[in-house]
Image (cartoon, grey):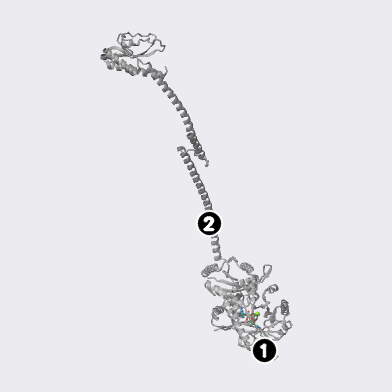
Amino acid sequence: MSLEMWSADEAAMTEAENVADSIARSGGNALFNDRPALQERLKVIHQTFHREVFIVDPQKRIIADSANADIGEVFQHDPESDPEYAVSKTLIDGKTRKFLKRKINSKTPINLLVVDIRKDGMDDNSPIVGAMVIEYTGVRDQLMAKALAANKLISILILVFLVATFFLARALGLSILVPVRNLRLAVNDFAAGNRSARVEVTSADEIGGLTLAFNRMADALNASDTRMQENDRTLAATALQLAEMNEQLQQEIEEHKRSNEQVEYLAYYDSLTGLPNRTMFSTILTRDLNQAERHDKQLGLLFIDLDQFKHVNDTIGHKTGDELLGEVAQRLKACLRKSDSCARLGGDEFVVLITEIEQDHQLESIARKINAALAQPFPLVGYEFFVTASIGICVYPEDGRDVSSLLKNAEIAMYHAKDEGKNNFQFYSEKMNRNSLLRFALEASLRTALGNNEFSLAYQAKVATRDNHIKGVEALLRWTHPELGPIGPAEFIPLAEATGLIVPIGRWVLHTACVQHAKWCEQGFPDLVMSVNLSARQLSDRSLLDDIAAVLDETGMNPALLELEITESIVIQDMEKALIKLNAIKALGVRLAMDDFGTGYSSLSIIKQLPLDTIKIDRAFIRDMPSDIDANAITTAIIAMCSALGLSVVAEGVETREQVDFLKGLACDEIQGFYFSKPVNADAFYALLASHAFEEVAA
Ligand code: C2E
Ligand code: MG
Ligand code: MG
């Protein structure tokens, strides 16, 4: 029997049992004895439950029957279908039993249940008074049908459940497991370094949310990675920058160190010659003076200044001049012992300190040695240059006991050597000191001379050889010192040039000469050419052109009647700059003359380049004419050259009739010199002009 059938059986049996119990046990003996009531009860049961039921007494006699058929009959059991004799046994032991009974004309046996009926109903110990047999086949079948139906339903439900579970699992597999697996793979992938690992969001559920969160996390990690990489890059760049800065700093420190060393070197040494400079020399001299004092010894100081070095420098250019100074330093050192010191004080000034004086004439012989060494030609830029030096000597302790007085006195002695014709040496003496003081005093007075109206102009005529008429006049500066009286230009002009005072003084000369020229014009000499000397220092002055233009404007002077005299050194210093300036002057309509021609170093090619109108042959050539053949030849050549170049020629320093005649013979244009007139003041010159005009007219 299947489980369902067994269950139905049991259920039907339980129900029959309950019905039987309800009669047997609730009714008890009383009901049992009331047969009609019992019969009525069974009828109700039959009507209510549709059950066949009958009750037997202990002898198996039917005492009540729901079918009201077999009452009084003894229940006959069927040994085939009821081998156990269920009713009989229950009547003995009171146990409920079930059994089958065949029905007449029916193959299918009916299911019956036998339940004991006790005297006291529910009391299991009271005696058995009968048994109730109840049929439960219908109920069983019903239950069976129900059970089968329920079974089917359950099967269907199980099937549905299984199918649903399958689809659910599939759905779960698709919607959960796949995304979860994808997520897991992506996480592994990402963890393995694949920063682009992402999962497609396929649902809006928790997994979708998780996937989205993973993707965001991956993005955030990527962004943070990128930021970190950027930070790394920035860090690397910063590190590189720092390294570069560090290197730069190191370089700067090195540079600083080098420049400090350089500064220190420059502070104590002369970069041009490598010799100690003034500062260093003072230290050396102080040290040696202390030693000399301690050991009661003498010291010798030689102050060396190259003669006309400025001129040399102007001629060969500063660069070659510097080379020359370097060579001079080498030669000086070669003249000295190791114990002696040599220094460059600046420009062309050198000093030599002799520490161990053993013989009386030792300083003198060193000075001679130096002069001789410097007298040797200096081969530079393909030429041989000749340099001489003036040396001043002073001795410790006689001529000074400290650094400054020794240096000062040696310099005074040097100036004295220069005054004595250069290329020599002089020992210091007290008298020299006085002269030197005079020089310093002169410089001081020169500074106040202009303000004190101490300057004046002398005028010297320039006469045309053709007809002896005064064609022009040269303005020459004169200084009358309030105490010293007249001081010659040769003495104060170099001083004025060296101090730069020549600029304001020269401006005054130009103005005074032009004003004077205007007066003479008014007085009837309108064609007179006024010559004014211009020093190199003035040419480099920025206001020169303005000054010239202003004075022409102020006096109304015809620019063609103003002639500015320059010297060769002017153009050799810086040819390009000079050319620009001279052309600008020329552009004002002013004439230009080359003064003292022949004494400088200018070449024919330079003369050709300059915008000149006049050449003035230096007095040095005229002086020796006509007796000196060389002077004659040079003068002849210069005049021929000027004629070829279309320049007018003036001979300076003409003092004799012979010179005049000779120059006239060479067709020299103009003559200037004492022969005609010395430089005189304005009034005297006017008188000269007037008398000359008269002479000319008379002639
Ligand atoms: P310099 O321009 O060559 O002037 C001619 C110089 O020769 C003048 O000397 C003049 O007095 C002198 N002299 C003229 N004829 C004779 C003569 O027959 N025999 C002799 N022995 N000498 C004669 P000074 O006036 O002493 O001037 C000397 C130099 O001073 C001038 O030479 C010129 O270079 C310079 N100088 C004069 N005045 C000025 C000036 O205002 N400015 C500038 N920068 N230099 C000036
Ligand atoms: Mg002159
Ligand atoms: Mg001259």
Foreground mark, 1 or 2? 1
CA distance for labels 1 and 2 = 83 Å
x, y percentage for residue 180? 48, 36
Q: Determine the image quadrant of residue 582.
A: bottom right
Q: How crowded is mark 2: few (under 14 residues within 10 Å), some or many (20 or more)?
A: some
Amino acid type, label 1: Ala
x, y percentage for residue 468? 69, 86
Between discs 1 and 2, the one toward the N terminus: 2
Q: Which of 246 and 78 is in front in this view?
A: 78
Query: Can the viewer see residue 131 in this picture?
Result: yes
Q: In this view, does 223 lie to the left or right of 659?
A: left
Q: Residues within 10 Å of mark 1 (few under 14, many from 20)?
A: some
Task: Name the residue located 41 percent from the left edge and 20 percent from the top edge.
Answer: 145
Q: Nearer the viewer, residue 206 or 231?
A: 206
x, y percentage for residue 47? 33, 17
Ligand 3 - quadrant of the structure image = bottom right
Residue annotated with mark 1: 693
x, y percentage for residue 39? 29, 14
Please, is residue 153 above or below residue 673 in the view? above
Mark 1 close to ligand 1, CB under 8 Å: no
Query: Can the viewer see residue 121 in this picture?
Result: no
Mark 2 close to ligand 1, CB under 8 Å: no
SS class of the residue under badge 2? helix
SS class of the residue under badge 1? helix
The N terminus lies in quadrant = top left
Q: Determine the image quadrant of residue 340.
A: bottom right
Amino acid type, label 2: Leu
Residue annotated with mark 2: 249
Instruction: Looking at this view, name the residue that lies furthest to the bottom.
Output: 698
Q: Which of 206 and 470 is in front in this view?
A: 206
